[in-house]
Image (cartoon, grey):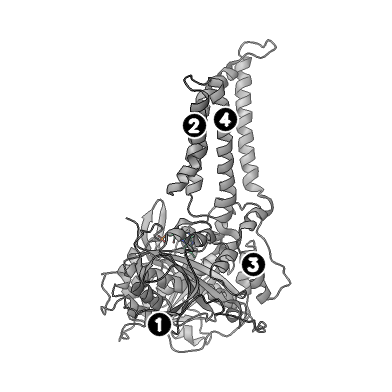
Amino acid sequence: MGPKILWVLLPLGVYAALLALAWRGRAPSRLAVNMHSSLLLMAYLLATAGLGLFWVANQQLPVFDWHYLFGYTTLLLLCLHLFFNLPLVLRWFGQPAHSPAPPGASRWRGIVRLAAGAGMVVLAFMLGTHWAGPSGAPAKLASDTTALATVVQYHEYSSESRRGVFRRAPAVAGGDPPAPFKSYPGAATVALPRAGPLAAPDGRGLSAVLQAPAAPRDRPLDLAAIGQMLHLSAGVTARRGGLALRATPSSGALFPGELYLRVRRVEGLQPGLYHFDPDLHRLQRLGDLPAPSGWLALEQADAALVLAAVFHRTGYKYRNRAYRYVAADLGHLLENARLAAHYVGASARVIERFDEALLAREFGLDGLQEGVIAVAAFNASSGTAMPGAGRQAKQDGDLGVTGSVHRATSLAPPLPLPAPGSLPDTGTAAGALVALPAPAPAQADLAATILQRRSQRRFSARPVPLRELSSMLADMFQPALLSPALHADLVVNRVEGLAAGVYRYLPAQHALQPVQLGDFAQQAQNAALDQDVIGDASVVLLLSADRNLALQHGARGYRMAFLEAGMMGERWLLSAVARGFGACPVGAFFDDEAAALVKAPAERWVLHFAALGYAAD
Ligand SMILES: Cc1cc2nc3c(=O)[nH]c(=O)nc-3n(C[C@H](O)[C@H](O)[C@H](O)COP(=O)(O)O)c2cc1C
């Protein structure tokens, strides 16, 4: 922020200097100041509108500082402008017309002019919001493509680049934001206990909970355990500025996720189907369990969590990039649900193949406006995954590419494997491998860590110790649950004992491979849409997926890769908080610049960024 304010004030400063030079010793005329400030006002208005349209609206920048700094300066100039021009305007309203008019007519003429002006402003606003130009209607992908081609096309379509900002018409909000919470009026409700007391039931710290459940419970799950699990997954953990912030992060704090519960054997809870209402921390009963369909992994579990997404919550703001954000968001949520189950002593099985349409119908969802994204079963048998039934919704609805890509990644008959591509993985090495010190497990309590986590966007200059970085990488890189395609790269800015540069993490050796050495903080910030959170960070994590590996079993792998990235991203955040750091997930970036930064091979898709550092005071 520091130097930015200087840039923003520069034109004003230059003008003040010119004024001082040109009018040495005498005051400038009122008319001259009026003219000059009008010109400056127009320049600032242009900058504000330009930044607003092309950066804030189109690129969905979450950090609005350029925009509001110009906004404040504009306000200042506007006051100056009004000060000089208000008397003129007032005189104009009261002025008699050239032709003699009956007494009182000039006042009426002024009122009519004023009303006409106001009417035109209202009309322009309505036209602007209702006819948004080419990007107002949701885009569609070619309908004759296969599911695999659809996701590849979608990924390209939703990629950002600097040129794209000017090529595409500015995005406008797709209607009003939907309600942040769903409710079922008239449904029977069950109040839930919240997470706590803040001590792991078996005293194990975060790193242990990441890997496995506590000693298996000798009794079934109960209502208190379910309450804790839901609170630690999607519960409201802070209320700020009209927002209900949750246990897991969400792009733009839009929280598209909805949790549904299939309860078979939970003490204190009647078997059946439930919806979790995080606002009031309660369950709403939706009905009885459906007749068994032979899907043992789900039907023999004590309970199963179905994670759905209301696409419009994210889509109204992020439009074509919404599906990426939704899948990454729900990956973060899924990981918390898995860890919370471990925390209360239950096993959690993240299920890869399931029939979205069937599950959506069970819970009364249309499957498109609100689609099923992920499923986890608690205390499940090792039963089979759900057979492929290909019951996808037929229409994309009005969701445009979000609908297309959700349909393409929903269960479908097996698809041919994509042609194997070459993955030159290590050809960009810039130095010898850096062996990482042995990781130290984080001892912090999982519930306390989740409840205190918030996105941190300002970092101090204090470097991160190498051993802590090593431990965080070990925490983050657990065996893949949904996609084997993920890679991790780091932009190292300030780590004790490690030269600044870009490194690839090699999990098998627990080592770092230098990709390019030097100061890449600014390049990383540029790639992340110029967000300070990335430039300031001591370390930036970039998660990317090998496209061929991700899609080896079909288009569904696309969603699974984002979910896996979200799960890894959540472990990165929790490990950071447990170790006394601040961290922030970042999904807004230029895809081409991010790939160039980590020298990603052509088949690699960068999916996610996350910043890390000690929080600024
Ligand atoms: C997938 C994803 C992408 C995000 N992208 C950004 C981003 O580009 N910039 C940013 O400052 N925050 C980003 N965030 C963080 C959210 O803004 C943040 O989670 C939200 O405001 C809620 O606040 P909390 O994390 O403190 O609970 C992202 C979060 C997620 C899960």
The answer to which quarter of the image holds residue 401 is bottom right
Q: Label 4, on which residue?
A: 38
Say if residue 357 shows up in the picture.
Answer: no
Instruction: Indicate whether 102 appears above or below 242.
Output: above
Is disc 3 placed on a helix, strand or loop? helix
Residue count near mark 3 (Cα–Cα under 10 Å), binned few <14, some 14–19, many ≥20: few
* Of marks 2 and 3, the one in the foreground: 2
Which residue is at 46% across, 20% downward?
A: 25
Kindly identify the amino acid type of the residue bearing the numbered disc 1. Asp
Q: Could you tell me residue 605's position as x and y percent?
A: 58, 72
Disc 4/disc 1 C-alpha distance (Å): 70 Å
* Of marks 2 and 4, the one in the foreground: 2
Q: Nearer the viewer, residue 565 or 323?
A: 565
Q: Earlier in the sequence, mark 2 or mark 1?
A: 2
Q: Are marks 2 and 4 in contact (CB under 8 Å)?
A: no
Which residue is at 39% across, 57% downward?
A: 458
Q: Label 1, on which residue?
A: 302
Q: Label 3, on which residue?
A: 156
Kindly identify the amino acid type of the residue bearing the numbered disc 3. Glu
Q: Nearer the viewer, residue 18 or 10?
A: 18
Instruction: Indicate whether 221 appears above or below 14.
Output: below
